[in-house]
Image (tube, grey):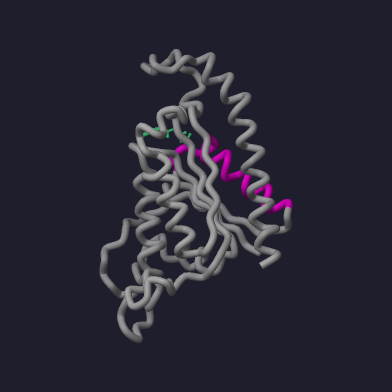
Amino acid sequence: MKLIAINGSPRKNWNTDSLLKEVIDGASSAGAETEMIYLYNLDFKGCKGCMACKIKNGKSLGRCNKKDDLKEVLDKVHEADVLVLGSPIYWHDVTGVMRCFIERLFFQYLNYDDHDSPLSTPKRTAMIYTMNMPSELHEENKYETLIFKKYENLMKEFFGHCETLYTTQTLFVKNYEKYHLGVFDEEFMKERHETHFSKITEKAYELGVNLIEMSDRK
Ligand SMILES: Cc1cc2nc3c(=O)[nH]c(=O)nc-3n(C[C@H](O)[C@H](O)[C@H](O)COP(=O)(O)O)c2cc1C
C-alpha cells in the first residue's frame, strides 16, 4: 500500500507541510509506504495541450508524455493506492505550482470519447488546504464552491473518492512584530495555532490512518 503526498507549499515545516507530514505519519502507522513530493523542488510547467495523451493507438494514450521533472511523479501517482494533495490558498485558489500539477494530472486521464470512463486508476484521495481567511468569510468569497467542492468533485470524478481537510487563520510568521502585518493580532494567531491548529494536526494524522485502512478494505 503506497501513499503519495504532493506538497504545493513553498514553505517547508510550515502549515501545509506539517499537515501533510501528519497524514504521512498516520499512514505509516497503518503500515503504508509513503512519499512526500515537494512541487517547488521540481522543474515543470502546466499542461501544454500537446494532445500526445489522446492519440489513437498512441504509446502515451492516457499518460502525460512531457519529459520533465513531473514525468516520474505522475508515474508514481498512477501506481499509488492513495493520493493526498496539500496546498496553501493563494488568491482564492491552490498555489500556481499545484494548479500546474493538477492540469497535468487530470488532462492525461480525460476521456473525450466517454467522460464516464476516465483513463485513471481508482484510489483513495484527500485534499488539504491551509489559509489565512476566517471561515466566516468563506461564503462571501465562495470558497466552498470555488475551491473545496471544485477539487473534491474533480478528484472523485477521476479517482472515485476524495476527502477534504482544511484549516483557517494559520500562523503566517513566528514574529509578527518584525513585519507589516498589522491586521493580524499576534496573540490571537499564536493562541489559535496552539489550540485550533493542533486539533487539525490530529485530524490529519487520523486521515492518514483512515485512508490506508479504507484502501485495505477495497
Ligand atoms: C501569495 C499569497 C496569497 C495568499 N492568498 C490567500 C487567499 O486568497 N486566501 C487566504 O485565506 N489566504 C491567503 N494567503 C495566506 C496563506 O494561504 C496561508 O498563510 C497559508 O497557511 C500558508 O501556507 P504555508 O504555511 O504552508 O506556506 C496567501 C498567502 C500568500 C503568500
Q: Position of residue 37 (x, y in %)?
A: 51, 53
Front in this rendered view, residue 49 or 92: 92
Residue 140 vs 36, above or below: the answer is above
Residue at 52% across / 65% down in the picture? 76
Residue 167 vs 182, above or below: the answer is below
Total marks placed? 0
Residue range of the region highlighted in magenta in the rendering: 9-29
Q: Position of residue 158 (x, y in %)?
A: 46, 65
Left or right: 218, with 88 as reference point: right
Classify residue 59 by image quadrant. Answer: bottom left
Residue 22 belongs to the span the image colors magenta: yes
Front in this rendered view, residue 99 or 166: 166
Residue 123 belongs to the span the image colors magenta: no
Q: Position of residue 11 (x, y in %)?
A: 47, 37
Left or right: 2, with 177 as reference point: right
Residue at 26% across / 70% down in the picture? 50
Q: Main secondary structure of the magenta part?
A: helix
Front in this rendered view, residue 124 or 179: 124
Residue 212 vs 90, above or below: the answer is below
The C terminus - image quarter: bottom right
Q: Residue furthest bottom?
A: 57
Left or right: 74, with 196 as reference point: left
The quarter of the picture showing ligand 1? top left
Residue at 67% across / 58% down in the picture? 212
The N terminus - image quarter: bottom right
Q: Position of residue 180 (x, y in %)?
A: 36, 16
Classify residue 106 by image quadrant. Answer: bottom left
Residue 163 vs 120, above or below: the answer is above
Residue at 48% across / 27% down in the picture? 169
